Image: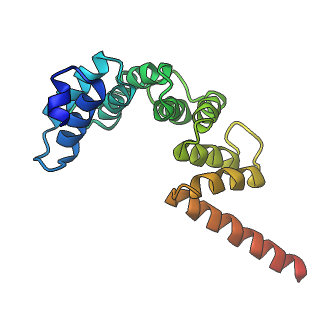
Amino acid sequence: YFEEASKYDHADSIFELGRFYDYGFGIEVDKSKAKEYYLKAAEMNQSYAINTLGYFYFLGDGVEKDYVKALKYFEKAAALENPYAINNVGCHYYTGKGVEKRDYKKARQYFEKSASYNTDIAYYNLGNIYYYGYGVSKDIPKARHYFKLAAAQNHSDSMIYLGKIYYNELNAVKNFDK
């Protein structure tokens, strides 16, 4: 059905065909064919295809790793309000990859915007910002809040951080009593 719909230039179907080749859903993995479908869908402003092309360049998946090119794709998809792309732009500022310099304030702003779409990974990234105090004052209660939101969506790394926070709080209470 995706192939049939793609004949009518249905962008979402073309994107899904790219995913089939990218991940081998019922067919053999073919990264170059996946990229062709993603490019075609991206030309139609399919934001998830554009975001996925950003991942190709960020990870060097079937292409030469290029953080600047990855960022351009993420920014284009973010301009189309793709919540994952918005988060990915934030990750570039968080890590300093593909940008002039690391900027935790900009990263946080992108993560907050992505989180406004209820995006688990953005909640996780905000949790990290507050857990470690990157560009903000360290704020464990705020970190806990964001990790809880991500964990509610089954984000496993957030669950690990929640465990660390609860463990440290439990030990602090135990040691206070001594």
Q: Taking 12 as reference, is 170 left or right?
A: right
Residue at the outermost right position: 177
Q: Taking 33 as reference, is 83 left or right?
A: right
Residue at the outermost left position: 28
Q: Quadrant of residue 16?
A: top left
Up the image or down, 176 lies above or below 143; here it is: below
Residue at the outermost top position: 43
Q: Taking 133 as reference, is 12 left or right?
A: left
Residue at figure coordinates x 22%, y 20% from the top left: 9
The front one of 106 and 151 is: 151
Q: Position of residue 141 (x, y in %)?
A: 77, 54
Q: Position of residue 114 (x, y in %)?
A: 57, 34
Up the image or down, 46 lies above or below 29; here it is: above
The front one of 51 and 167 is: 51
Q: Taking 115 as reference, is 48 left or right?
A: left
Residue at figure coordinates x 58%, y 58% from the top left: 151
Q: Position of residue 119 (x, y in %)?
A: 54, 42
Residue at figure coordinates x 76%, y 69% from the top left: 169
Residue at the outermost bottom position: 178
Residue at figure coordinates x 20%, y 42% from the top left: 20
Q: Quadrant of residue 18?
A: top left
What quarter of the picture does the N terminus occupy?
A: top left
Up the image or down, 164 lies above or below 109; here it is: below
How many marks the image carries: the answer is 0
Q: Position of residue 117 (x, y in %)?
A: 58, 36
Q: Is any part of residue 141 visible from this angle?
A: yes
